[in-house]
């Protein structure tokens, strides 16, 4: 499948419309995704998938976690975390976590919709919430959790040639996953899987 260009079609309104359709392309053709067994009660969580409206084209914002954290130390992720009792919905969780981790103010974010839930082997069921971010904004990353915040052009992810397919054995089971290396950043696992879902949604619409 060839790459697609963001320049001629992507806008806040168009992206929101695609998310409202609630479907991803290429059914049955994706890598097998981990799903919690029926007897397992997953921990609900949410992440913000921030689409930043840059003049040169939209970008996705990521965080790199600090190396001392218990879960996913040093990995690339979207800002997010487990649902708390005070959160009214998954969108509230994503906005709260993004503000706590990066300092990105909620007033700069417009929620556009959700991607399908994503199960990860550490016990979480993650709801990816897509938000449109309008510059200018100031970031104040939490030094305990976040090593750095960076952006990658969305157009990079819309080229399937940048989607690597990998597998490895974990606890006697073969795990399949995507990796999308960009410069010095190695984006893989659940984060790359969520980016792949966004890619499917966009490529299915053009």
Image: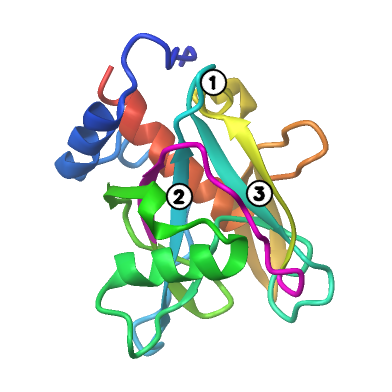
Tell me whether circle 3 and circle 1 mark residues in contact (CB < 8 Å).
Answer: no
Q: Main secondary structure of the magenta part?
A: loop
Rate crowding at label 3 as few (under 14), some (14 to 19) or many (20 or more) other CA atoms within 10 Å.
many
Q: CA distance from mark 3 to mark 1?
A: 16 Å
Rate crowding at label 1 as few (under 14), some (14 to 19) or many (20 or more) other CA atoms within 10 Å.
some
Above or below: residue 117 compared with residue 45: above
Residue at the spot of label 1: 159
As rendered, which of 145 and 160 lies closer to the eye? 145
Quadrant in the picture for the C terminus: top left
Q: First in sequence, mark 3 or 1: give its number.
A: 1
Where residue 203 appears, x then y in whole percent?
Answer: 35, 24
Where residue 33 appears, x then y in whole percent?
Answer: 47, 57
Judged from the image, the secondary structure of the residue bearing numbered disc 1 is: loop
**Residue bounds of the magenta highlight:** 128-145
Numbered circles on residues, count: 3
Residue at the spot of label 2: 49
Q: CA distance from mark 2 to mark 3?
A: 15 Å
Tell me whether circle 2 and circle 1 mark residues in contact (CB < 8 Å).
Answer: no
Asked whether 140 falls inside the magenta stretch, the response is yes
Asked whether residue 164 appears in the rendered view, the answer is: no
Rate crowding at label 2 as few (under 14), some (14 to 19) or many (20 or more) other CA atoms within 10 Å.
many
Residue at the spot of label 3: 188
């Amino acid at each position: 499948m060839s790459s697609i260009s963001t320049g001629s079609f992507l806008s806040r309104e168009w992206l929101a419309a695609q998310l409202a359709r609630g479907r991803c392309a290429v059914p049955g053709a994706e890598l097998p995704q981990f799903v919690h067994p029926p007897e397992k009660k997953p921990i609900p969580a949410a992440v913000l998938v921030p689409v930043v409206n840059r003049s040169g084209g939209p970008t996705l914002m990521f965080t790199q976690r600090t190396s001392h954290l218990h879960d996913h130390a040093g990995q690339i992720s979207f800002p997010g975390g487990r649902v708390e009792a005070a959160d009214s919905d998954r969108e509230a969780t994503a906005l709260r976590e993004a503000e706590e981790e990066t300092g990105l103010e909620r007033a700069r974010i417009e929620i556009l919709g959700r991607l399908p839930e994503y199960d990860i082997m550490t016990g979480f069921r993650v709801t990816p919430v897509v938000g449109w971010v309008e510059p200018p904004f100031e970031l104040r990353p939490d030094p305990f959790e976040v090593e750095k915040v960076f952006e990658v052009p969305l157009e990079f992810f819309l080229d399937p040639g940048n989607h690597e397919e990998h597998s490895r054995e974990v606890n006697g089971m073969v795990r399949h996953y995507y990796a999308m290396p960009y410069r010095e950043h190695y984006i893989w696992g659940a984060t790359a899987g969520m980016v792949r879902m966004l890619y499917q949604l966009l490529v299915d619409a053009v």
